[in-house]
Image (cartoon, helix red, strand yellow):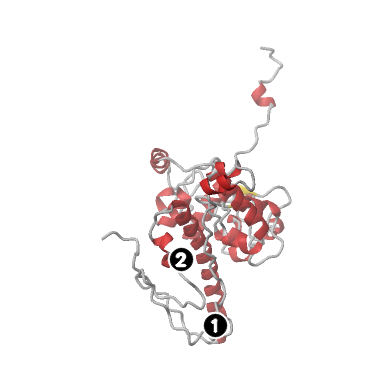
């Protein structure tokens, strides 16, 4: 080898590692937890500046914990680490390690302006093919400003196309995608259906025999976001007791998909999975609406201190 020639590996600049591509195996997770040594100067972090896996306890925590990171370091801004004390902080830190990074000059407004940035890069996060935090970036979520992130289509009109594309590719059934980008949603669902059922794209259009052998999938029930009957007052509508159990709901604003036999029967896996993912989007939107209303009503004196106690819910899928 020529002594003046550098190895090819040194001449070629490898691209930086990207987002998580798979879940950890049980062996990998056990090893990761075992190898971590806590940094006593920064609660919630190990000595390498990564969130402590042992603190991920809840089922929602585990969705983030189980992501296999391709990156090995967190991009703390200016190398300055910060404590990771809250559930949102540890999830967003792990999400930052595994998230999809914004292209150059296409960060959210807050990251682009450098407002309260914890990390150097702007990244959105997916767990099990589901966009987290209503598409907000992990940087904004870490500082408690996820609701202000300009990637959220329910709050901002011009979401960068790369964000919409990332959601369409990973979560084609997203309700937020359907509500704000219906054309992209329809195309994404079509592509997803073709991937699950390649034969649907083989038969020529207008073939009756092909239609009989490969009938189209059943149409999904569309959930209504607003009042079912706008002319009727909401005060007179009494909560509806679900036939399959669970908390009562007001049919003016919400109709539970658990009343659909195809959902509670759990016979159609694809239908059940799509509904399950849709519910996550509904929960995110309903939670945000409830929080915003509560904040305003507290300011106006319509409410006293809120009661955060949660009633116990019945599991309609429990096996007797």
201 w.r.t. 236: above or below: above
- Residue 11 location in percent, x, y? 69, 25
- Residue 168 location in percent, x, y? 62, 52
Q: Earlier in the sequence, mark 2 or mark 1?
A: 2
The quadrant of the image that shows the N terminus is top right
Res. 318 mark: none
Q: Locate residue 75 relative to residue 24 in the image: left or right.
A: right
The picture quadrant where one finds residue 73 is top right
Which of 107 and 80 lies nearest the eye of the viewer? 107
- Residue 26 location in percent, x, y? 39, 41
Label 1: how many Cα within 10 Å (few below 14, some 14–19, many 20+): few
Say what secondary structure mark 2 lies in.
helix
- Name the residue beneath numbered marker 2: 257
Say what secondary structure mark 1 lies in.
helix
Which of 77 and 10 lies nearest the eye of the viewer? 10
Q: CA distance from mark 2 to mark 1?
A: 30 Å
The picture quadrant where one finds residue 242 is bottom left
Which of 39 and 105 lies nearest the eye of the viewer? 105
Q: Locate residue 178 relative to residue 320 in the image: left or right.
A: right
70 w.r.t. 267: above or below: above
- Name the residue beneath numbered marker 1: 297
Which of 54 and 45 lies nearest the eye of the viewer? 54
The answer to whether any part of residue 99 appears in the image is no
7 w.r.t. 150: above or below: above
- Residue 50 location in percent, x, y? 50, 47
23 w.r.t. 224: above or below: above
The answer to whether any part of residue 191 appears in the image is yes
């Amino acid at each position: 080898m020529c002594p003046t020639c550098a190895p090819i590996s040194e001449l070629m600049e490898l691209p930086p590692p990207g987002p998580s591509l798979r879940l950890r195996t049980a062996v990998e997770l056990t090893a990761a937890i075992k190898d971590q040594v806590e940094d006593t100067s920064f609660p919630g972090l190990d000595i390498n500046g990564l969130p402590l896996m042992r603190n991920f306890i809840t089922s929602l925590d585990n969705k983030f914990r189980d992501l296999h990171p391709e990156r090995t370091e967190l991009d703390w801004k200016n190398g300055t680490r910060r404590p990771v004390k809250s559930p949102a902080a540890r999830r967003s830190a792990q999400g930052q390690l595994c998230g999809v990074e914004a292209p150059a000059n296409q960060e959210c407004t807050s990251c682009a302006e450098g407002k309260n940035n914890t990390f150097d890069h702007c990244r959105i996060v997916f767990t099990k093919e589901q966009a987290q935090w209503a598409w907000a970036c992990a940087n904004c979520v870490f500082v408690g400003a996820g609701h202000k992130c300009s990637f959220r289509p329910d709050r901002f009109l011009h979401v960068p196309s790369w964000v919409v594309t990332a959601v369409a590719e990973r979560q084609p059934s997203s309700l937020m995608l359907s509500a704000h980008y219906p054309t992209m949603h329809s195309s994404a669902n079509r592509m997803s259906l073709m991937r699950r059922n390649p034969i649907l794209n083989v038969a020529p259009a207008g073939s009756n025999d092909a239609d009989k052998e490969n009938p189209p999938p059943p149409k999904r029930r569309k959930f209504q976001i607003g009042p079912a009957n706008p002319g009727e007052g909401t005060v007179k509508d009494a909560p509806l007791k679900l036939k399959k159990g669970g908390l009562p709901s007001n049919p003016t604003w919400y109709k539970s998909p658990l009343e659909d036999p195809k959902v509670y029967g759990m016979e159609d896996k694809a239908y059940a999975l799509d509904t399950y993912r849709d519910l996550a989007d509904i929960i995110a939107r309903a939670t945000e609406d409830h929080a915003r209303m509560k904040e305003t009503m507290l300011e106006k004196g319509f409410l006293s201190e809120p009661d955060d106690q949660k009633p116990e819910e019945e599991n309609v899928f429990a096996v007797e």
